[in-house]
Image: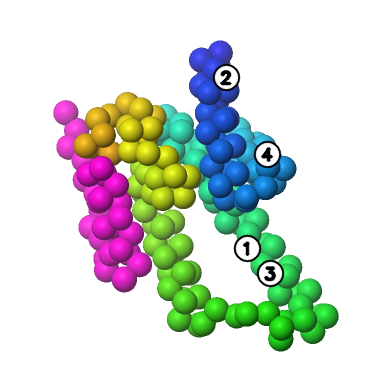
Amino acid sequence: MNEFDDLLRELIPRLRRFAQSLTRNPSSADDLVQSSLEKALSAWGSKRPEGDLRAWLFSILYRQFLDAHRRSRRYTRMLELFTGGAEDHYQPSVERTVVAQSTLVAFERLNTEQRALLLWISVEGLSYKEVAEILDVPIGTVMSRLSRARQALRQLSEGEIMPPALRILK
């Protein structure tokens, strides 16, 4: 358990940095990290033992952010409905909204490793070298996995069906 505490202490600054990039507010980022850690600890029994703790925590944090963002948007829409303030705001086109929603749905269908790679590099802005150090793999491996993750996201968001990824076990 002490090893777990040490690993968690090491990951908290990374989680906080990622949350900061999502929320763009230090206070909100701290709240997001705290709620994500609470959720992770309460769901600890459902975590796959062979799964990567870092990826699992980043995934929980991102889902927590999306859920909070959706709740906030719903609240704002309801408030606008009652106050009549919706006419003044810019509304994105239906096409852009559909594309964004389908991309988010496709993103959620990616496996944990692919989501983590895309989040770390595309959202959090970590370098290939930093991600390679986190995963303890060569930079070339990060680049090829990221390429496959981007291709999978593109295929899923365009509606293509992906065969399940099979791994060879020795």
Give percent across and percent down for residue 121: 39, 45
> Dot 4: what SS?
helix
Percent of width and height locating residue 40? 58, 36
* Mark 1–mark 2 distance (CA, rounded to whole Å): 32 Å
Q: Name the residue under label 1.
A: 70
Does the magenta portion include 163? yes
Residue linked to disc 4: 30
Q: Which amino acid does label 1 sit on?
A: Arg
Which residue does the numbered mark 3 point to in the structure image?
Answer: 74
Q: Which residue is drawn at 26% across and 58% down?
A: 151
Residue drawn 63% across the image and 80% down it: 90
The answer to whether mark 3 and mark 1 are in CB contact below 8 A is yes
In the rendered view, does 104 fall on the left or right side of 133? right
Q: Residue furthest top?
A: 2
At label 4, which amino acid type do we have?
Asp
Image: magenta residue range: 143-170
Q: How far apart are marks 2 and 4 (CA)?
A: 18 Å
Residue at image mark 2: 5
Name the front one of labels 1 and 4: 4
Q: How far apart are marks 3 and 2 (CA)?
A: 37 Å
The disc, 3 or 2, on the residue closer to the chain's N-terminal end is 2
